[in-house]
Image (cartoon, rainbow, N blue to C red):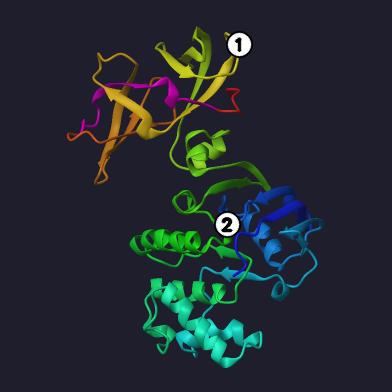
Amino acid sequence: MSLSVPLRLEGISKRFGHVQALKPLTLDVRGGEMLALLGPSGCGKTTTLRIIAGFETPDEGSVLIGEKDITELPPNKRSLGMVFQNYCLFPHLTVGENVAFGLKMRGIPAADRAKRVRAMLELMRLGNFEERTIHQLSGGQQQRVALARSLVTDPSLLLLDEPLGALDKNLRERMQFELREIQRRLGITSILVTHDQEEALTMSDRVAVMEAGAIIQIGAPTEVYERPHSQFVSEFLGTANIFHAVVLRRVQQDMWAVRLEHGKAEMLIACAANLASGGAVKIAVRPERLKMDAPAGGGMPAMVRDVVFRGSYYAYELSIADQASPIFVYTQARKAIPADGEVTIDWSPESAILLADQAAP
């Protein structure tokens, strides 16, 4: 199998009429990694995937697999495997016939086809399913058949277009780990397109967050989640509390005191940048990183507006003085604080993320 082959997108762009679907984009995907293209509908992730697959031709730029420029090649000449959200399996064929379809189209002899199909079904833990029809399979089994069919032809690159979107929540979570384990075992370079933040964070080596036809941040899942560059990234990758503040002074090296726009309490943030006293900054703090304490606990006064139990933790909605948007806190405390209760909130300096788009409105 042609594994661990890098992919390079070199200045590709695409316009549909007056709409700039994809701005000039350069991206290097490392050999053997799983890269997730993550973003809302219309951000350009599907257009990027379709250009890689050969379903769309870029207005400018090049697509290279390894050292080979495939920009002008048709999809069937690109050595790609692709799994779609609806799997696109043939209902009139058996499992084995579905997996063998691509090999048959390539003229692979029957004996060789049978051997490769059996080996691939064993890899997918479907060794006894070869003679079954598609309607006899569960959603997860159909997903594995689609994956087997895409991999049996020894592609250089695996493209996954919302591959788990048709599954229910529990099965989708299980399949995230299964698909990731198979990709790691084979070491095949893979592109995952999804709008599901959890899916991207769970399955990928790196996440490329897209907005308005451009990649606005790329990095390891923990890096993008814990250190987003902008409010859009911080909120798209999960709930984020956004605070506008004024810089008061440097407390020590890489530590600054700030005052929230509508509060009196001083809060600390860790930041290596050289901030200007009196300057406006924008800060993001994840709900699980906020600390909630009794009213006399110091920090910023807040009022509990609502609380819900989510199995492993309580989710609180708080309000703070003169701020319209609510604040969310997740805590594993065993006893809930009732609505209308008074609390204070605080954070460790390292939990406060200084956003690049930091000017307060």
**Which amino acid, mark 2?**
Gly
User: In this picture, which residue range is highlighted in magenta?
Assistant: 336-354
Residue under pointer 2: 32
Quadrant for the C terminus in the image: top right
Where 172 falls versus 123 (above or below)? Answer: above
Residue drawn at x 60%, y 82% as measured from the top left: 102
Mark 1, other Cα within 10 Å: few <14 / some 14–19 / many ≥20: few
Q: Position of residue 103 (x, y in %)?
A: 60, 83
- The residue sitting at the left extreme is 335
Q: Nearer the viewer, mark 1 or mark 2?
A: 2
* Quadrant housing residue 176: bottom left
Measure the C-alpha gap from mark 1 to mark 2. Answer: 44 Å
For the residue labelled by badge 1, is the local secondary structure a helix, a strand or a loop? loop
Where 87 falls versus 248 (above or below)? Answer: below
Residue under pointer 1: 276
Magenta stretch: includes residue 347: yes
Please count the marks in the image: 2
Q: Position of residue 277 (x, y in %)?
A: 57, 8
Could you tell me if residue 323 is visible in this image?
A: no
The reply to whether discs 1 and 2 touch (Cβ–Cβ < 8 Å) is no
Asked if residue 314 lies left or right of residue 44, the reply is left
Q: Nearer the viewer, residue 214 or 173?
A: 173
